[in-house]
Image (cartoon, rainbow, N blue to C red):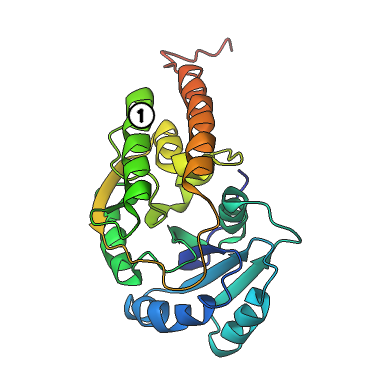
Amino acid sequence: MSLSPAPPTLDLSVIVPVYNEEETVPRYATALRPVLDSLGRSYELLLVDDGSTDGTATAMKALQSSWSQVRVVRFRRNAGQTAAFDAGFRSARGAVFVTLDGDLQNDPADIPRVLAGLSEADCVNGWRQKRQDSWLRRLSSRIANGIRNRLTGESIRDVGCSLRAFRRECVAGVKLYNGLHRFLPTLIRMEGFRISEVPVNHFPRTAGHSKYGVWNRAFRALRDLFAVRWMQSRQLKYEIEGNESGV
């Protein structure tokens, strides 16, 4: 991933991928703005429209007109959540990135909590202790987390949680491929950064609908898991003992 070579001009970039969320976007102003304004930091809310075909673009323009910190990146066509996060990282101007899902199932009030965790880690991942999903989704997620941690040697309890905060440099060397946003904490750890987790809230979806089913998530995640495991096994690991000059 190639981030902007220019130094960050803001303290914080909040990156949210959205896809056909015209009902949800207007509620971001109500839920997010008080939290971000209370932080006392310079920030931007970066909405990445993943090729929406409904009224999401119109809703984002309306939000921009009333909230100067809102920026929008729009895809010509749907490219997937990983691409949306990647575009957000490349476009962001903050020293710290915060990511959330676009359906407001993450609680904006938890943002100060994950940011506070950066005092002891480079990346803080949210852990949805009380998930407000169907029993099938919760079960499939628990199984997937167990398999993922077993094969990758991780101990992350909720890698599927999109609410996380991390320093800009954590993703500067990360190369994302389709689907690998689910493994972002592992990829960040592979770059040598420290990972921690904090409990966060989780809300049931009240508008729109999930764009992915349980089983296609499971099969895609399993395929991607083997790719990440291969990357771990082939990672370069060496220490230079000396670098002597012949002069």
- In terms of image quadrants, where is residue 164? bottom left
- In terms of image quadrants, where is residue 72? bottom right
Residue visible at 34% across and 57% down in the picture? 133
Res 243 visible:
yes
| Percent of width and height locating residue 173 | 54, 39
Answer left or right for 101 relative to 116.
right
Q: Residues within 10 Å of mark 1 (few under 14, many from 20)?
A: some
Rendered view: 142 above or below 67: above
Location of the N terminus by quadrant is top right
Label 1: element kind: helix
Res 123 visible:
no
| Percent of width and height locating residue 189 | 39, 35
Residue type for callout 1:
Ile
Residue visible at 36% across and 47% down in the picture? 136
| Percent of width and height locating residue 161 | 38, 52
Location of the C terminus by quadrant is top right
Answer left or right for 244 relative to 163.
right
| Percent of width and height locating residue 206 | 42, 73
- In terms of image quadrants, where is residue 199? bottom left
List the residue tagged with mark 1.
Answer: 147
Which residue is farthest right? Answer: 76
Rendered view: 72 above or below 240: below
Rendered view: 187 above or below 32: above
Residue visible at 27% across and 48% down in the picture? 197
Which residue is farthest top? Answer: 246
- 151, 87: nearer the viewer: 151
